[in-house]
């Protein structure tokens, strides 16, 4: 893909670790990325790393809003590459889904006392909830403040600077997080975006923020390095496959190489419109984007078995296979798959 060659089509999907220290990577991140890279994957994607302070979902989110974060991430990218694995990173912004307790702490909105105790008295206001519109979901969540047009354009610039820092840290693949109810998805969705300026209204207005983020990121991300975009292809509340195809067609000539096809995250409920959640339930999204938008696609979601993953590729339903939960159980899944598929009879991957 562009100037990057993957040794196989297995991708470690970005998985939040909630283990950063004020945005800085820790030894946990090095160990976590390293075990997947050493397990035989072609591409290891570091978790959603935030483009500005307000974009952090939890106290443990990684950051790329300052040059000071680059050395810690360089250490991780270098180690991934030393395992003969391509180093990737996802960049994102949580928007109205920011400032929450970690999942094992309940995932509820953080309290001012908790933020003050962890970070100091000034950080509550610095960690303001912002969104395209003053709209929340569910209704029990705090109300975000609607971004001004000037603030929207400032955040777009921050995405570009985060891309620059990702390049300086040595990452070879970059993914823009536009899914799961986070800021870009909030702009795309008529459920969350009630703006009446040029960043809202009709579908083109709602897509404008995402398109301008892509353009700005590409200005700072080298031409020979691939750029992915993760989308919730279906969110069941107004954004669906037809809109995702339209957006993919628009961003491909602007520098997006792969659409990472996920779903849901906007209303807090699982997406069920495509049928029951089971093995490979999101693969049809990847197939449709690949076929109708003429763009490389990545399938993710309950892809468990080696023969299942291989069949997706052989049938032309996706170009890359991303795994998350199955790799949590077995970080050596790629090496195991190579044995089961007869691709490594000499155990050369060990």
Image (cartoon, helix red, strand yellow):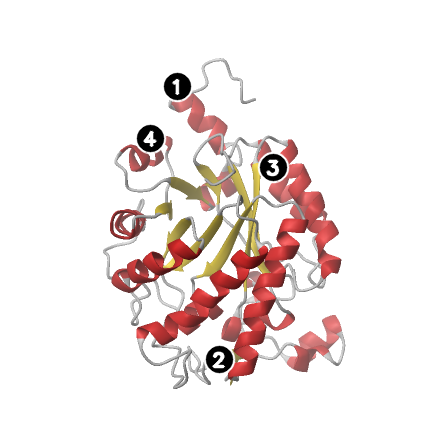
Q: How far, Cα to Cα, is label 1 from label 4?
A: 11 Å
Q: How far, Cα to Cα, is label 3 from label 2?
A: 36 Å
Of callouts 4 and 2, which one flags the residue occurring earlier in the amino acid sequence? 2
Q: How far, Cα to Cα, is label 3 from label 4?
A: 23 Å
166 with respect to 319 (left or right): right
Q: Residue at x 46, y 85 (%)?
A: 134
Pointer 1: residues within 10 angstroms few (<14), some, or many (20+)?
few
Q: Secondary structure at mark 4?
A: helix
The residue that disc 2 covers is: 141
Q: How far, Cα to Cα, is label 4 from label 2?
A: 42 Å
Q: Residue at x 35, y 77 (%)?
A: 191
Of callouts 1 and 3, which one flags the residue occurring earlier in the amino acid sequence? 3
The residue that disc 4 covers is: 307
Instruction: State yes or no: discs 1 and 4 in contact (Cβ < 8 Å).
Output: no
The residue that disc 1 covers is: 342
Image location (x, y in percent) of residue 320: 40, 40
């Amino acid at each position: 893909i562009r100037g990057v060659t993957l040794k196989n089509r297995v991708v470690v999907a970005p998985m939040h670790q909630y283990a950063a220290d004020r945005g800085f990577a820790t030894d946990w991140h090095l160990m976590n990325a390293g075990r997947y890279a050493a397990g035989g994957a072609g591409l290891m994607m570091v978790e959603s790393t935030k483009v500005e302070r307000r974009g952090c979902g939890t106290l443990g989110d990684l950051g790329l809003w300052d040059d000071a974060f680059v050395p810690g991430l360089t250490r991780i990218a270098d180690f991934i590459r030393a395992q003969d694995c391509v180093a990737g990173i996802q960049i994102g912004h949580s928007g109205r889904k920011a400032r929450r307790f970690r999942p094992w702490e309940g995932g509820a909105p953080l309290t001012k006392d908790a933020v003050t105790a962890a970070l100091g008295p000034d950080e509550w206001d610095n960690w303001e909830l912002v969104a395209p519109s003053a709209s929340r979901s569910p209704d029990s969540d705090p109300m975000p403040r609607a971004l001004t047009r000037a603030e929207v354009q400032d955040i777009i610039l921050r995405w570009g600077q985060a891309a620059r820092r990702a390049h300086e840290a040595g990452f070879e693949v970059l993914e823009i997080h536009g899914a799961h109810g986070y800021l870009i998805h909030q702009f795309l969705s008529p459920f969350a975006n009630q703006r009446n300026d040029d960043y809202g209204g009709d579908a083109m207005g709602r897509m404008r923020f995402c398109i301008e983020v892509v353009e700005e990121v590409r200005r700072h991300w080298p031409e020979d390095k691939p750029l992915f975009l993760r989308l919730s292809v279906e969110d069941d509340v107004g954004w669906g496959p037809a809109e995702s195809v339209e957006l993919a067609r628009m961003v491909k000539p602007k520098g997006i190489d792969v659409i990472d096809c996920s779903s849901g995250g906007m209303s807090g409920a699982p997406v069920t419109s495509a049928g029951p959640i089971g093995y490979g339930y999101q693969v049809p999204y990847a197939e449709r984007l690949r076929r109708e938008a003429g763009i490389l696609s990545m399938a993710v979601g309950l892809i468990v078995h080696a023969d299942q993953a291989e069949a997706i590729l052989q049938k032309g339903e996706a170009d890359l296979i991303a795994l998350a939960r199955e790799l949590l159980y077995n970080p050596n899944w790629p090496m195991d798959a190579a044995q089961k598929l007869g691709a490594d009879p000499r155990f050369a991957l060990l």
